[in-house]
C-alpha cells in the first residue's frame, strides 16, 4: 500500500514537471515540448491506474468523454452552419476551415496565445463576479484603467525590472480595483444595478483613455503618431521567451504564464479559502448567506474589487508584454469576448484558460484563413456566435432528441 | 434523433463535393505580382482611405497587373501578424492603411527586407523609415483650403445665389475624431475660408465616432441652428448624416475624400477630394516598373493633382465665375508656394 | 449662464426627441422583456437587424413603409430566437443576448456584402420616411410643445402610440398582468393554468419588434441608408434607461428622453465653443449623466423577482 502511493507520488511530480517543461519548451518554439506533454499524459494515465485501478480509469475517461461530447458536437455543428454560409457566397468551406485550423493551431499558434492572454484575465474577472452573483459587464473599462495606469507608470519608471514589473502590476491592479469600487459602493449603498453602472464606467474609461493618450505623447495636433502614447521604458517590458529560448517567436512574452498562474490562484481562492466560500454563498443565495452571518455587502465589495483587479491585469500584461505603449484599441472588445469566454468555461476558472486559448485560436485562425483564401472575416464572427450558442444550449440536443 | 444524425452526416460529403464547383480560390495565374493590403481595424466600407486604397488596387487587378491579397484585422493586435503574414505569403508590395500602422510597420519591415511596404497616411521623419518603407501622405489641407475658399465666398458675398444660403457669415464642419488627416482637412478649410472672408466664423463639432450617422446628422443640425449655411464633413460614415440633415434644414453641404454628390445632389455643393485611389494605383505602377523607392515619404498634393475639388454638378450655374476664379487663384498660389497652409490647429492659431 | 438659456430652446428639445426616439422604443422593449422575467441584453443586435432589413426592404421595394414592416419583422424574428433559446432551450439569458449581439454584427456585415455587393453602407434608399413628416392640426399649435412633439415624422408618432399602448397593456390588461406575474411569480401563474412559456415568448417577441422599429428609425427615417454599426451602442443605453427607469414603461420613457437630451446637449455645447477643452470631455457627458441617473433614481425601484431565472416545469408523460 505504502509502496504504491510513494511511486504514485513520484509519478505525479514527474507528470507536473513534464507538463511545465513541455509548455515552456513549446512556447519557445521547440516542438520537442510536445513529446514532453505526450509523456505527461501517459504518466498521468499510469498514475491513475496505479492509484485507483483500471476500472476507475475507464470510468474517468468515460465521464470525461461525456462532458466533452456535447461541446465538440456544438463546435462541429457551428462550423457546419458556417460552412453553409460560405457555400452560399461561393467559397470552399472545407478548404477555408482547414486553413483556419492550420492558421490557428499550427502556423500562427503564437498569435492564438497572444490573443488569449488578455482574454484569460478579463474572463477570470467576469467569472469571479459571476460566482458572487454579480455581472461585471464593464471589464472593458477596468481593462482600460489597467492599461492607462501601466503606461503612465511604465513611461516614468526607471527601476530595475524585478522591482518595476511587480510594482506596476500591484499599482495598476489597484487602480482597476479602485475604479470598480465605485459601482460596487453604488450597488451596496443605493442598489444601483451593476450591469448599468459598470457599463457606463466602461464607456467613461474608454473616453478618458483617449484623453490620457493625448496627454502622454499622442496629441494628434502635435505628434506624428497620433492616438499612440510614448513607449514605456525598456526595463518595464515583460521578458519574452526569446530571451532564454532563442528560437522562440520574438513577440511571445511570459504573460501567458502569469495568466495561467492567476487562473490557478483564482481557483484556489474560490474553492479553498473562507473568502471564496463566502463569495460563492452570496452568489448562490444572498438571503441565505445573510442568515448564515455573512456580511453580504462586504463580500459584494470584495468581489467587485477582485474583478476590477483581474481585468486591470489584462491591460497591464498587454502593455508591458506586447504593445509597450498604449493606443485606443478599437474593436478589440476584451470585455465582451471575456464574457463569451467566461460563459463557455461555465464559470470554472481552470476551464477559462482553455476556452480563452480556443477563442484566441479562432481569431488567429480566422485572420489566417481570411488572409490566405480571401474569405470574408464576418464568417468568423458568425461561427463564434454559433459556437457560443450551441455549446451553451445544452438543452438544444435534449430538445431535439425529444422531438425526433 | 438518429434520423437527424444520418441526414447530417450524409450532407457533409455533399457540401464538400459541391464546394469543388464553387468559386476557384487560389488558382490565379502565377506570374502576377501579389500586392497585399492590410486595412485598419475599421475594415473595408469605411467610406474613406480603406475603400480608396482598395479601389486603386482593384483597378490594377482588373487590368491584369497584380493580384490583391486583402486582410481586415479583428483588432489592433492583428496588425503585426497580418503584415508579416502577407510578406510570408509572397506579397511583394504591401499597403498598410491608416496612421495606426505607424509602429507596426517599423516593427515588421526590417524582418522582410525584400518586401516593399507602403504606409497610407503615415509620415516618417524621425527616425527615417527603413529603405523598404514608404510613407504616403496627402496634403488634405490643400483640398480643404479650396473647399474653404468656396464656402467662405458663397456664405457671404454670393448668398443671394441660392435660397439655401442665409445672411449670416457662419460655416461649419463635422469632424469624426481628432486624427491627423481630419486635422489637416479642417485647418485647411478654416484657413481657406478666412483667406477670402476674414471675419467669417467657422464652427466645428467633434462627434467622436466614424460610424454613427444619427450623431452626424444632429451635429449638422446644431451647426445650422447657429447660422451655418455650408457644412462640410470629415467624419467617414458619421458624415453620411450631414446629407439627411441638409434636406431637413435646407442648407448646403460638402462631402469629403471622394465626390459624394450622389448622396444628395440638390444639396451637395462640392466635395474636398483626396485621391487615395489614384495615388495607390500610381504607386503600384511605380512598383511594377521598378521605380518604387522606400526610405522616405511621398506626399501627394495639388501639384501632383492628387487632391482637389469635385465638380459642382447641379451648382454649376449657382457658383459664380468669380468664385471659380478665386479657387483657381488659390490653386496656383498653393502650387507656386505663395500660400503656405498650416497643418495643425496650433500652427494656425485656432 | 446666458449660454444655457440660449441652448434651451425648441430646437434643442426637437433634437432631444430625435435622438431619444430609438432609445425610447428599445428601452420599452427591454422593460416588457424584463418584466416577463427574461433578461434582454441583445437589443443592440436586434436593432441592427431591424435597421438593416428596413433599409434593404425600403431600397428593394422603393417603399419606406414596407421597410418599417420588414424591419419590425426582422427584429421580431431575431427576438424569437432569443425567446426560443431562453424559454425553450433554457439557455442563460445573458449568453443568448451576447450571442444575439455577436450574430447581429456578423450577419448584417455579411448580408451587406451579399445584398449590396460592398461592405460599409447600403445604397441610399429612394424615399425615406422623413418625407412623410406632418403636423397634427390642432396639437401642433400648442406653444413650445406643439412644434416639438406634434410636427414630427411617422416613427416618432408610432413611438407615442407605443408608449400609450404599453402603459395601457401593463396597467390595465390581462396580458400585462400575466407578463408581470411571469416575471415575479411564474409558478403562481402556471398554477393558474396560464402558460408562462407562452407569456414570455410574447413579451420577448414584442421587445424584438420594438427594437426593430427603433433600428428602422435610424436607417430609414433619421437616415437614408444602413451603415455598419450604426446603432452605435444605443441598445446598451436603452438597457440602462430601462433600469434607471425602474423597469416601468413611463420610467424608461423619461430616462431615455433624458439620455437623448444629454446627447443633444453635448453636441450643442461644442458648437457654441464656449469651453476650449479637448472634444473628448463632451463625449463623456452622456455616460456620467446616465450614471448619476441610475445611482440617484434606482434607490426605490426593484428588479422583477424572477428576472433572469430559468423556469421549467417537468410534466410527466410528455
Image (tube, rainbow, N blue to C red):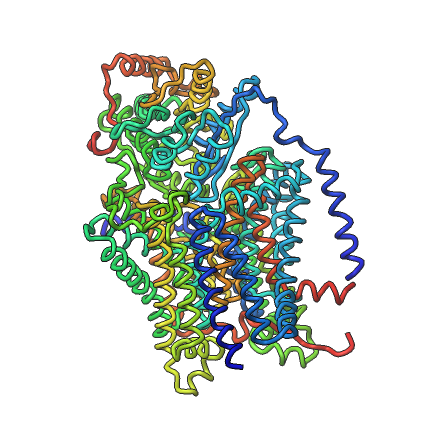
Q: Which percent across, then down, holds residue B289?
A: 45, 13
From this view, report whether residue B332 is shown above or below residue C51. above
Seen from this angle, which residue lies furthest right?
Answer: B3
- In the rendered view, would you say C148 is above or below C64? below
Work out whether residue B148 can be spotted. no
- Say which of A59 and B332 sits in front: A59
At which x and y percent is residue C295?
A: 36, 67
Between A385 and A242, which is closer to the camera in this rendering? A242
Task: State the quadrant of the N terminus of chain B.
Answer: bottom right
Q: Is C264 left or right of A149, judged from the image as shown?
A: right
Asked if residue A231 lies left or right of residue B52, the reply is: left
Specify the quadrant that holds the C terminus of chain B: top left
Compared to residue A290, the image places residue B243 above or below, namely above
Compare residues B309 and C229 and report the one nearer the observer: C229
Q: From this view, report whether residue C274 is shown above or below residue B198.
A: below
In this figure, what is the number of numbered marks? Answer: 0
Q: Is residue B320 left or right of C158 when viewed as pictured?
A: left
User: Residue B129, how many percent across, how many down?
Assistant: 31, 28
Residue B244 % position (x, y): 47, 37
| Residue B49 visible to an observer of this rendering | yes
Question: What residue occupies the far front of the structure in this picture?
Answer: A3
The structure residue drawn at horizontal position 56% and vertical position 36%, both measured from the top left corner, is: C122
Amino acid at each position: 500500500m505504502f509502496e504504491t502511493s510513494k511511486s504514485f507520488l513520484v509519478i505525479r511530480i514527474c507528470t507536473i514537471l513534464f507538463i511545465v517543461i513541455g509548455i515552456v519548451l513549446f512556447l519557445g518554439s521547440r516542438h520537442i515540448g510536445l513529446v514532453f506533454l505526450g509523456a505527461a499524459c501517459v504518466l498521468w494515465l499510469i498514475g491513475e491506474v496505479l492509484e485507483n485501478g483500471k476500472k476507475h480509469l475507464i470510468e474517468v475517461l468515460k465521464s470525461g468523454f461525456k462532458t466533452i461530447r456535447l461541446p465538440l458536437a456544438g463546435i462541429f455543428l457551428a462550423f457546419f452552419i458556417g460552412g453553409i454560409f460560405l457555400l452560399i457566397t461561393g467559397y470552399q468551406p472545407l478548404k477555408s476551415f482547414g486553413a483556419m485550423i492550420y492558421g490557428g493551431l499550427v502556423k500562427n499558434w503564437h498569435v492564438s496565445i497572444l490573443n488569449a492572454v488578455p482574454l484569460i484575465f478579463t474572463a477570470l474577472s467576469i467569472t469571479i463576479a459571476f460566482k458572487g452573483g454579480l455581472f461585471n459587464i464593464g471589464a472593458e473599462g477596468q481593462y482600460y484603467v489597467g492599461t492607462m495606469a501601466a503606461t503612465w507608470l511604465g513611461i516614468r519608471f526607471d527601476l530595475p525590472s524585478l522591482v518595476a514589473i511587480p510594482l506596476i502590476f500591484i499599482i495598476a491592479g489597484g487602480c482597476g480595483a479602485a475604479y470598480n469600487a465605485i459601482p460596487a459602493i453604488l450597488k451596496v449603498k443605493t442598489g444601483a444595478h451593476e450591469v448599468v453602472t459598470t457599463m457606463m464606467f466602461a464607456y467613461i474609461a474608454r473616453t478618458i483613455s483617449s484623453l490620457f493618450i493625448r496627454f502622454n505623447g499622442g496629441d494628434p495636433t502635435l505628434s506624428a503618431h497620433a492616438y499612440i502614447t510614448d513607449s514605456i521604458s525598456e526595463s518595464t517590458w515583460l521578458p519574452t521567451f526569446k530571451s532564454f529560448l532563442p528560437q522562440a517567436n520574438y513577440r511571445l512574452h511570459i504573460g501567458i504564464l502569469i495568466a495561467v498562474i492567476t487562473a490557478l490562484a483564482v481557483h484556489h481562492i474560490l474553492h479553498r479559502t473562507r473568502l471564496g466560500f463566502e463569495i460563492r454563498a452570496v452568489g448562490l443565495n444572498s438571503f441565505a448567506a445573510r442568515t448564515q452571518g455573512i456580511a453580504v455587502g462586504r463580500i459584494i465589495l470584495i468581489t467587485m474589487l477582485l474583478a476590477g483587479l483581474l481585468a486591470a491585469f489584462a491591460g497591464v500584461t498587454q502593455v508591458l508584454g506586447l504593445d509597450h505603449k498604449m493606443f485606443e484599441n478599437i474593436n478589440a472588445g476584451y470585455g465582451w469576448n471575456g464574457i463569451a469566454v467566461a460563459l463557455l468555461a461555465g464559470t470554472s476558472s481552470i476551464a477559462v484558460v482553455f476556452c480563452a486559448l480556443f477563442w484566441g485560436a479562432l481569431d488567429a485562425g480566422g485572420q489566417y484563413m481570411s488572409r490566405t483564401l480571401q474569405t470574408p472575416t464576418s464568417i468568423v464572427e458568425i461561427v463564434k456566435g454559433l459556437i457560443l450558442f450551441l455549446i451553451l444550449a445544452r438543452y438544444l440536443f435534449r430538445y431535439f432528441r425529444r422531438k425526433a | 434523433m438518429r434520423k437527424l444524425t444520418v441526414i447530417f452526416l450524409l450532407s457533409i460529403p455533399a457540401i464538400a463535393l459541391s464546394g469543388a464547383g464553387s468559386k476557384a480560390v487560389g488558382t490565379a495565374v502565377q506570374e502576377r505580382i501579389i500586392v497585399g493590403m492590410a486595412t485598419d481595424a475599421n475594415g473595408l466600407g469605411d467610406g474613406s482611405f480603406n475603400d480608396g486604397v482598395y479601389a486603386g488596387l482593384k483597378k490594377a487587378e482588373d487590368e491584369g497587373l497584380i493580384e490583391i491579397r486583402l486582410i481586415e484585422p479583428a483588432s489592433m493586435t492583428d496588425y503585426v501578424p497580418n503584415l508579416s503574414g502577407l510578406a510570408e505569403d509572397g506579397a511583394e508590395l504591401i499597403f498598410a492603411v491608416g496612421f495606426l500602422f505607424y509602429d507596426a510597420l517599423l516593427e515588421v519591415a526590417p524582418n522582410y527586407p525584400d518586401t516593399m511596404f507602403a504606409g497610407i497616411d503615415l509620415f516618417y521623419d524621425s527616425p527615417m523609415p527603413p529603405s523598404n518603407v514608404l510613407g504616403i501622405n496627402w496634403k488634405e489641407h490643400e483640398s480643404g483650403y479650396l473647399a474653404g475658399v468656396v464656402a467662405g465666398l458663397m456664405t457671404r458675398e454670393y448668398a443671394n445665389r441660392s435660397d439655401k444660403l442665409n445672411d449670416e457669415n457662419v460655416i461649419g464642419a463635422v469632424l469624426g475624431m481628432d486624427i491627423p488627416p481630419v486635422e489637416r482637412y479642417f485647418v485647411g478649410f478654416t484657413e481657406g475660408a478666412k483667406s477670402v472672408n476674414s471675419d467669417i466664423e467657422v464652427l466645428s463639432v467633434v462627434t467622436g465616432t466614424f460610424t454613427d450617422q444619427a450623431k452626424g446628422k444632429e451635429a449638422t443640425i446644431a451647426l445650422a441652428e447657429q447660422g451655418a449655411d455650408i457644412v462640410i464633413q470629415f467624419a467617414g460614415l458619421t458624415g453620411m448624416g450631414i446629407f439627411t440633415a441638409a434636406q431637413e434644414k435646407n442648407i448646403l453641404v460638402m462631402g469629403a475624400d471622394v465626390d459624394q454628390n450622389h448622396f444628395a445632389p440638390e444639396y451637395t455643393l462640392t466635395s474636398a477630394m483626396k485621391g487615395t485611389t489614384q495615388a495607390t494605383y500610381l504607386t503600384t505602377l511605380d512598383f511594377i516598373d521598378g521605380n518604387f523607392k522606400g526610405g522616405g515619404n511621398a506626399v501627394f498634393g495639388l501639384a501632383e493633382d492628387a487632391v482637389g475639388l469635385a465638380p459642382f454638378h447641379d451648382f454649376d450655374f449657382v457658383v459664380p465665375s468669380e468664385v471659380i476664379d478665386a479657387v483657381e487663384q488659390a490653386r496656383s498660389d498653393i502650387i507656386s508656394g505663395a500660400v503656405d497652409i498650416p497643418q495643425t490647429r496650433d500652427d494656425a492659431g485656432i | 449662464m446666458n449660454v444655457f438659456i440660449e441652448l434651451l430652446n425648441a430646437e434643442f428639445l426637437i433634437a432631444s426627441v430625435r435622438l431619444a426616439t430609438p432609445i425610447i422604443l428599445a428601452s420599452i422593449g427591454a422593460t416588457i422583456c424584463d418584466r416577463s422575467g427574461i433578461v434582454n441584453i441583445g437589443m443592440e443586435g436586434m436593432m441592427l437587424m431591424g435597421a438593416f432589413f428596413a433599409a434593404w426592404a425600403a431600397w428593394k421595394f422603393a417603399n419606406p413603409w414596407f421597410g418599417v414592416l420588414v424591419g419590425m419583422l426582422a427584429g421580431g424574428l431575431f427576438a424569437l430566437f432569443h425567446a426560443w433559446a431562453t424559454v425553450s432551450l433554457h439557455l442563460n439569458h445573458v449568453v443568448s443576448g451576447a450571442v444575439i449581439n455577436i450574430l447581429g454584427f456578423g450577419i448584417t456585415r455579411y448580408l451587406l456584402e451579399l445584398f449590396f455587393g460592398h461592405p460599409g453602407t447600403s445604397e441610399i434608399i429612394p424615399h425615406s420616411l422623413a418625407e412623410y413628416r406632418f403636423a397634427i392640426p390642432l396639437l401642433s399649435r400648442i406653444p413650445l410643445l406643439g412644434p416639438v412633439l406634434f410636427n414630427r415624422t411617422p416613427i416618432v408618432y408610432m413611438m407615442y402610440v407605443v408608449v400609450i399602448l404599453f402603459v395601457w397593456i401593463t396597467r390595465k390588461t390581462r396580458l400585462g398582468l400575466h407578463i408581470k406575474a411571469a416575471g415575479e411569480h411564474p409558478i403562481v401563474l402556471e398554477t393558474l393554468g396560464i402558460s408562462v412559456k407562452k407569456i414570455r415568448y410574447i413579451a420577448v417577441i414584442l421587445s424584438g419588434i420594438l427594437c426593430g422599429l427603433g433600428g428602422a428609425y435610424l436607417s430609414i427615417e433619421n437616415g437614408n441608408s444602413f451603415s455598419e454599426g450604426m446603432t452605435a451602442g444605443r441598445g446598451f443605453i436603452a438597457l440602462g434607461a430601462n433600469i434607471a427607469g425602474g423597469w416601468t414603461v413611463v420610467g424608461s420613457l423619461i430616462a431615455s428622453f433624458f439620455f437623448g437630451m444629454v446627447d443633444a446637449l453635448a453636441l450643442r455645447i461644442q458648437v457654441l465653443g464656449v469651453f476650449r477643452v479637448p472634444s473628448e470631455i463632451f463625449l463623456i457627458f452622456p455616460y456620467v449623466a446616465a450614471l448619476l441617473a441610475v445611482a440617484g433614481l434606482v434607490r426605490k425601484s426593484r428588479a422583477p423577482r424572477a428576472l433572469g431565472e430559468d423556469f421549467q416545469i417537468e410534466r410527466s408523460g410528455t
